[in-house]
Amino acid sequence: MDMQNALGLSGGQAELVYNSFSFAVAAMGIAFVYFLVSRNRVAPAYRSALTMSAMICGIAAYHYWRIFGNYAAGTWNEGYRYADWLLTVPLLVAELVVVAGLAKDVARKVTPRLVAAALLMVATGYPGETAADGSSARLVWGIISSVFMLYVLYELFAGEVGKALKSQSGAIGKKLNNIRYLLLFTWGVYPIAYILGDEKSWLADALNLSGSDATTAIQVGYTIADVLAKPVYGLVIMSVALARSESEGYKAA
Amino acid sequence: MDMQNALGLSGGQAELVYNSFSFAVAAMGIAFVYFLVSRNRVAPAYRSALTMSAMICGIAAYHYWRIFGNYAAGTWNEGYRYADWLLTVPLLVAELVVVAGLAKDVARKVTPRLVAAALLMVATGYPGETAADGSSARLVWGIISSVFMLYVLYELFAGEVGKALKSQSGAIGKKLNNIRYLLLFTWGVYPIAYILGDEKSWLADALNLSGSDATTAIQVGYTIADVLAKPVYGLVIMSVALARSESEGYKAA
């Protein structure tokens, strides 16, 4: 395939990024359909979790389609990723609450807090991402955004959601535990990519990553993290919803 | 990203407007799917409200897709917004009546009046929007359109719908109250943008907003207002429909 180097990538790098984006479009698009048609397999109480998974993957399919189109035309726009996260990250935390087994009043109290923190985490990351490399704006917005991320992680590991996730035994308890670590692992990619995106950062320096190597690592890393954090995460959420539905005697009609 | 300046915006402004439009496409498109698949979660009497929310968001997704495509190609067409509102604004008021808890005969009487007023509000705004800056046509059509808007707001705050909305207590009453203020707040953006769109207006003068600053403020403002007035408004309407369904003993199968 004849690859363009308009973005300064070598032939092999350009092809890897190109194929990653196309892979993400396919994975997200089909996961959108899968979660939509699977809604009736779980009891009504858990369907909103599958609906949210479908929405997350549908939104991501749209954004990867645009990122892919822009890339093929020789341009980057990191704004697409932030627009995507602004819509999907609040849904990712909200769907976890649906299957976490919280009391209804606790869920109603904790969901708006988590959604607000997720929104603020993404919204405050954007001005940092678009600030100049090595600037203090990049550092300050990154720290502000991290505070909101730490709050979300605190809630999921030690707060009310964390307690509910840990208190459950058997297969469901094990799955809920896996979800937390999947979240921690995949979300960890984003701040790393944020720091690596700044070529003057200590991390870019330590890893000796810059230019097209850094760009390729960031774009492929984001794509892998997004596939794990969206369709794969949705599958684990769905397996909890299926297990709960079964244990409550629900049978799909 | 290498942004075009064909519309006279600076690089940062052009990128902000571009990302806002793309964000709106994603938000409206996914809200369309969400309201469609969520219809069965509410009792049959309230499903038409969710169907209308889906229609509103689907129509808006189409128009933002066109506005975005036109913008990327370097052209504006404010006609898309008016075509959108002509279809969506009557639905926005009609779906409120569905969940407002009016007696059936009152709802049947008040809906056509509200729909007609909403249609006339949008239809008379369009000739003003396309009139020359500082012209008397712009002022006169603006005033005529405002009269219809004030009638709709009168109906929702003091008329028969207003009385029904205020007379309900508990969680449902609180939500209905929030809906009215969400409508008032988001609808308030449109006349402000209409006045600001006229560079010779007292408001553009007072705020010292003109040229690309005004354009950016108007386009981003419209987009935020549309996301609040359509998907977010639809979510609040849905939460009323869910609460009413639950209080009536409805259970999704």
Image (cartoon, coloured by chain):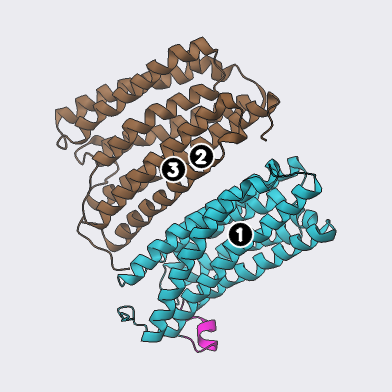
Chain colours: A cyan, B brown
Alpha carbons under labels 2 and 3: distance apart: 17 Å
Please check the rendered image and state whether residue B118 is part of the magenta-colored stretch, yes or no.
Answer: no
Give the quarter of the image for residue A127.
bottom left
Q: How far from the left and from the top, in percent, is residue B234?
A: 50, 36
Q: Give amino acid for label 1.
A: Phe
Rendered view: A7 above or below A50:
below
Which image quadrant: the C terminus of chain B? Answer: top right
Alpha carbons under labels 2 and 1: distance apart: 33 Å
Alpha carbons under labels 3 and 1: distance apart: 24 Å
- Give the residue at mark 3: B227
User: Upstream in the sequence, badge 2 or badge 3?
Assistant: 2
Mark 2 or 3: in front is 2
Dot 3 lies on which element? helix
Rendered view: B127 above or below B211:
above
Q: Residues within 10 Å of mark 2 (few under 14, many from 20)?
A: some
Q: Give amino acid for label 3.
A: Val
Q: How far from the left and from the top, in percent, is residue B166?
A: 57, 19
Residue B114 seen by the camera: yes
Which image quadrant: the N terminus of chain B? Answer: bottom left
Residue B217 seen by the camera: no
Mark 3 or 1: in front is 3
Question: Disc 3: which chain?
Answer: B
- Going 75% across and 47% down the picture, which residue do you hit? A245
